[in-house]
């Protein structure tokens, strides 16, 4: 991996070099997709609307049809993380934990059709990325090359590059874009991204962006290179949990009275570090603290006892503002909030009677026919969910589901033992039905639209970023100083 400030050069990926074994986990490549998941992914939209409105009679079919047909302007590709939760009265719902602007998932998704060897890699590139590239005026190829920018997840991003080369029948540049990378590797010239190869600066007309760690500090908001997704999608909620919570709240106000809402934990935002113990106390001593701009499981702290709170308070962070959310745990130790107490449904108990917390990742993309599902997978926690907490229980081991493990600067690995596939073996352990998958999809769509609407609000009529408005939404000086306009 590249050290801070080092000069790196992109790989040149040629057409017809895609090899499936390089871009899926072995357990996913050899898996057979579960019939119910396959049915869901192929379910006609009208049938889905009819089913959902039958179970939610306050939702008008026309309203839901308009929502699912929404055309994203900025947030074209997203992946929501959801918890399957239930109340003490047995009311189940999918809760949106976050929605990511550069989501992983392809390498964990069994092939929907054995004859389509490039899977949903190609599906995303054909139905979402290609229209963006085709929207470039004039002779596209004369305007620069195609690239994939990344800072982790090489298995997946190299798959996108290889399939992109096939889709466009041209060479694609696979470019590392690490936090702290040298300006001699990637530059902005005439408002276009340029990458350096063999001492030559090459203009990029369009790029698939899998840059997850503070992408706004090296890729500007205003950029003529077509990006999937543009940086504003990160700032408006895709990599910014603070603004995401506000975007969800605003869209829920718009949806009020329509029978639809984004389900999310009770969220308190713009919290200084000194205030956090007060908010933890307000939530009954059980809560989740988040550094709003971290991801991949970093910067999230579950608090269920004084020891966990003390450990958090002893840490130093470069940012000034945090969010504090209600905690979804087990029934006896979840946060109690105005809408009641929700706790994890979890996996089907093992032979030992152990239930594990798991989340659902639902990846979607915007198409000419609305927002459609792409991939689904699940991740479970390290340790089984305890009925009762001990005095110094490690709540993160029971509640943390992210598989990313940071080994060092710009170096990651994945704990695939906890990966749960949508195949004939793992899916049955999740206890999900078709209606749960539909609910997860609709929650993903709603949260995606909320962030896209926030993106629109952050530009004025002349297409310039409204920094004053953004500052009013997210007044964190460290973050504001990082953003490239």
Image (tube, rainbow, N blue to C red):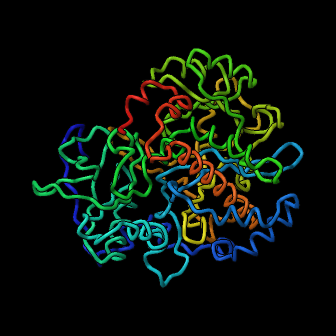
The location of residue 96, given as percent across then percent down, is: 66, 47
Q: Quadrant of residue 208?
A: bottom left
Is 425 above or below relative to 308? below
Q: Which part of the image, by quadrant, shows the C terminus?
A: top left
Q: Nearer the viewer, residue 65 or 282?
A: 65
At horizontal 43% and vertical 43% (from top left) the residue drawn is 464
Q: Nearer the viewer, residue 364 or 3?
A: 364
> What count of labels does the image hold?
0
**On the rendered structure, is 2 left or right of 94?**
left
Query: Residue placed farthest to the left in the image?
Result: 199
**On the rendered structure, is 267 left or right of 217?**
right
The location of residue 353, given as percent across then percent down, is: 74, 50
Q: Quadrant of residue 327?
A: top right
The location of residue 303, given as percent across then percent down, is: 64, 27
Can I make out residue 296 in this image?
A: no
At horizontal 74% and vertical 63% (from top left) the residue drawn is 64
**On the rendered structure, is 348 left or right of 134?**
right
At horizontal 64% and vertical 57% (from top left) the residue drawn is 445
Query: Residue placed farthest to the bottom in the image?
Result: 115
The location of residue 392, given as percent across then percent down, is: 64, 24
Query: Residue placed farthest to the top in the image?
Result: 274
Q: Nearer the viewer, residue 33 or 160?
A: 160
Can I make out residue 447 in this image?
A: yes
Is 436 above or below relative to 314? below
Is 203 above or below relative to 294? below
């Amino acid at each position: 991996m590249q050290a801070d400030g080092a000069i790196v050069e992109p790989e040149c990926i040629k057409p017809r070099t895609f090899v499936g074994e390089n871009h899926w986990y072995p357990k996913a490549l050899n898996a057979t997709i579960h019939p119910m998941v396959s049915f869901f992914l192929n379910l006609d939209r009208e049938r889905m609307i009819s089913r959902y409105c039958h179970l939610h009679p306050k939702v008008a079919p026309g309203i839901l049809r308009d929502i699912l047909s929404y055309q994203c302007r900025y947030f074209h590709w997203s992946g929501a993380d959801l918890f399957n939760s239930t109340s003490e009265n047995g009311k189940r719902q999918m809760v949106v934990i976050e929605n990511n602007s550069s989501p992983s998932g392809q390498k964990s998704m069994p092939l929907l059709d054995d004859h389509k060897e490039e899977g949903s890699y190609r599906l995303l590139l054909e139905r979402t990325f290609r229209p963006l590239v085709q929207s470039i005026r004039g002779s596209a190829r004369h305007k620069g090359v195609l690239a994939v920018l990344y800072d982790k997840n090489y298995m997946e991003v190299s798959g996108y590059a290889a399939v992109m080369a096939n889709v466009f029948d041209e060479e694609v540049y696979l470019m590392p874009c690490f936090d702290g990378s040298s300006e001699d590797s990637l530059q902005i010239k005439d408002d276009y991204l340029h990458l350096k190869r063999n001492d030559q600066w090459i203009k990029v007309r369009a790029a698939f962006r899998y840059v997850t760690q503070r992408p706004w500090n090296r890729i500007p908001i205003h950029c003529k290179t077509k990006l999937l997704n543009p940086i504003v999608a990160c700032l408006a909620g895709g990599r910014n949990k603070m603004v995401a919570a506000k975007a969800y709240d605003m869209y829920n106000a718009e949806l009020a009275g329509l029978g639809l809402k984004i389900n999310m934990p009770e969220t308190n935002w713009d919290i200084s570090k000194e205030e956090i113990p007060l908010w933890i106390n307000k939530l009954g001593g059980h809560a989740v603290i988040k550094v709003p701009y971290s991801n991949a499981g970093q910067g999230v702290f579950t608090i269920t006892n004084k020891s966990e709170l003390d450990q958090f308070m002893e840490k130093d962070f470069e940012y000034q503002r945090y969010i504090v959310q209600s905690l979804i745990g087990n029934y006896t130790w979840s946060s109690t909030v105005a809408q009641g107490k929700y706790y994890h449904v979890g996996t089907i108990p093992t032979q030992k009677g152990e239930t594990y917390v798991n989340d659902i990742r639902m990846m979607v993309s915007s198409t000419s026919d609305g927002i459609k599902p792409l991939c689904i997978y699940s991740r479970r926690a390290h340790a089984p969910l305890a009925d009762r907490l001990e005095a110094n229980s490690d709540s993160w081991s029971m509640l943390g589901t992210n598989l990313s493990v940071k080994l060092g600067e710009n170096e990651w690995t994945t704990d695939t033992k906890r990966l749960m596939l949508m195949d004939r073996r793992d899916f049955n352990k999740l206890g999900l039905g078709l209606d749960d998958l539909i609910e997860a999809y609709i929650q993903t769509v709603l949260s995606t639209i909320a962030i896209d609407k926030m993106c629109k609000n952050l530009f004025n009529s002349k297409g310039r970023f409204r920094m004053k408005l953004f500052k009013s939404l997210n007044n964190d000086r460290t973050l504001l100083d990082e953003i490239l306009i």
